[in-house]
Image: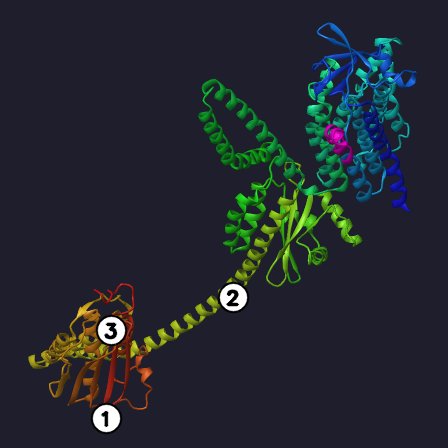
Amino acid sequence: MRVLVQLAYGVTAAGVPFCLVLYFTVSSFLFGNPGFSVDKTQHGLRIARIHKKLNPVQVDDLIIEIDRVPYDRVLRGFLLKSANRQNPIVSLASDKVVDTFSLRTIPHTPGSVLSLIWLHLLLITVFISLGLIALLRAPPDKLTRLFFFMLCGFAGSIASTLASQLGLVIPSVTSVSFFALTCCNWLAFGAWAHFACCFPQERDLSRNRPWLPPLFYILPPLLTVTLSLILAGEGSEFLGMLQRLRNMFLPIIIVGAFGKHLVDFYILPPDIVRNQIKFPLAAYWLSFGPYFFLYLLPNLLIDRPLIYFRTAAIAFLILPLAYLFALLRYRLFAVDKLLSKILAYILLIIFFTGLYAAFLLAVKHWFLGKNTLSEELFLLFLVLVIAGFNPALSRVHKAINRYIFGNQLQPASILHAFSNRISTALEISDLVNIVTLEFAEQFGLDKIALVISSGDQVQIYPKKYSSELSGGEDTELIIKQLADNEFILCQIRQNNGHLSKKFATLRQDGWSMAFRLQGSRRINGLLWIGNKKSGRIFNDDNILFLATLSNHIGIALENSLRFTSLSDSKRQQEEMFDQMVQQKKMAALGEMSTVLAHELKNPLAVIRSAAQHLNTTPPPSEIMDEMLAFIIDEVDSLNLTINSLLTHARHRNPTFQPIDLLKTIPALLKKWQLTKDHNPNIQTSYNLPGKIPPLYADISQLGQILLNVIRNSEEAMGESGKLSLSLQEEGEHAIIVISDNGPGIKKIHPEKLFQNFFSTKERGLGLGLSVCRQLVNAHSGTIAIKNGKNCGAKVTLCLPFYPQPSTQPSPAD
């Protein structure tokens, strides 16, 4: 039913413009085509345009009489009885000379009529279509009906100018056109003022003022008629003055509507309703700039416009289109972006138009008559314009966004940098500082907060917003609402009454929206965004950018939470490890103390006993020499013990250099045989290959390893025995085997022999083999000990020719 009522209302209101189109079209076929178009002025019909040279007229000539009827009587021709002839006698004023001639016409064809009025028909159709779209798609309220009625009035005004466009200088037709145009203008202006007063609904000035709307429809005709009577009286000049002043109220309506919307913009808070007003505010400049300065003011001041009415009507089309977007709430989050692009295009069009005019002047001045060169320059100019348009558009767009539309988020230029910083922030404190301090400052946000939900705990950063955003239950409800949406606006009503109240409170506290911080499996928190410091509303690019950034923050937050958990686990493990190391140190200290007590106690006892014996009675020289020898031997034993401890404690990194084992091993055995520690009753031998690659090793440490193993083998064999040393190459390793025919290893696991302070000898610290393993490991090698097949023990050294540490030379060296 509502659709039928609206359809009937639309057909009735839209019928008037189409009836006028039909009337003037039929009249053109009846009275013919004079070959020119006219404009109505105060003193006559001005020749505006000549289509065909049928009559002796020039542009700007003024028709002051038709069939001896003065212009003022022509305007009221449909009220008076007057003959309408196809070829009337016309009085033409041109340069203060009046010429009279019989108007010559040719029959109109549908094609000729359409070629003259197609633009008017297009504008009428567009106005009516915009109104119908509003009736069918916008909410069915007073604003929608007023918008449709206003557009029908403007469509009627355009339809009323068809008589002038078709050159119909028949008195009755001219009179109908004049009165229809005047009435349609007044009705359209009244509906326009009424609509501007009520738009937007949040600032409806007619609410509780029922007397205000009638004034919008009464004042324009009343004041215009009154002023015309005052200026022209009731005489012949009255209708001419009325024709001149019929648009007088338009500047007042334009300024009043624009001022009202401007006040609305500054009074309303920065939300969607405020963005509704941005469309018409921008459209007023684009619509009425050409009409006001090039058509209306010249018509009032010099009685002739500088542009055609249809040109002004095309520009005026921008305003209803903007109002329609506002009524339909079309892309309200992208208003600033849309307006900045439009303004950038307009500025560039003006700039390149001026540049082209200057280019033409330069070509005429310098290359007049040089057609080829001029064409080449024109092509060069065209190429430069094409190449420079997009870069210039980008720069102008950025400048408009910065200086006109304030501090807007620029995702393309800044998202990458912040994404890198956020992704590398492992500590939650670092992430909080980047988001709540640097991010808010960079993008001009008055405040921003990070809410972290982990289990039953909710943490809010910065802490000063805890009172505003507190409530674990509210946070969980909001997180549930964000399960299927990336963000939620505080100004949108929720189905949950509790949440609606919460959002209303948050909006009063200055919060605009919340974004979810999505992890791999769950939502780990919320990113609360306050208002812009500039007071502007967020657009769709801003929201898309914030949603993208929130995804990065969500991943970074999950990484930070995992890093915190791993750090806690690592700290606990380190504490446990430190405790274990301390226990091992204490155990090693106790073991070493026991060994040292044993190793130091016996030599000290011998030294004390010898010293006491020498101190009691003067001994013979032989006994004194023997006692002193005991003391020296025991001091040497103590010195050996201390050196063993120092060797174990002071580990030196090996210095690698190439060693020829075929020469080094015989030299080491010969050196050992010359020491006093060697037992001459033990036979030593070696078995070497004919050729082997050089071994990169520390020759000093290698000698220490081999001599320590040989010393242990001879001490284990006792009074006599055999010791052999063999060398062979296996792949990239040199294998050195020291074997003896001693008692071997009995009832002891071989690995235990390499433990610190373990020894099978009566005297000794038990550090020899431990030091050997330490040095072998430094050479990236291995050492192993086991019993021989028949008897004795066998120690195997496996050393790589080229050790792994980075200090060693490569094989190419």
Eye-nearest disc, 1 or 3 = 1
Distance between mark 1 and mark 3 Cα atoms: 29 Å
User: Reading the chain from its start, which is encountered first: label 1 or label 2?
Assistant: 2
Residue 707 image offset from top left, x and y in percent: 19, 77
Q: Which residues are magenta?
A: 110-125
Extreme residue in the left direction:
621
Circle 1 residue: 791
Q: Amino acid at mark 1?
A: Cys
Q: Amino acid at mark 3?
A: Ser
Q: Amino acid at mark 2?
A: Ser
Q: Quadrant of residue 472?
A: bottom right
Extreme residue in the bottom direction:
790
Circle 3 residue: 644
Foreground residue, 789 or 517? 517
Residue 462 visible, this angle: no
User: Reading the chain from its start, which is encountered first: label 1 or label 3?
Assistant: 3
Q: Is residue 559 left or right of residue 808?
A: right
Q: Is residue 451 above or below residue 802?
A: above
Distance between mark 2 and mark 3 Cα atoms: 40 Å
Foreground residue, 358 or 341? 358
Circle 2 residue: 569
Residue 241 lies in the magenta stretch: no
User: Reading the chain from its start, which is encountered first: label 2 or label 3?
Assistant: 2
Residue 479 visible, this angle: yes
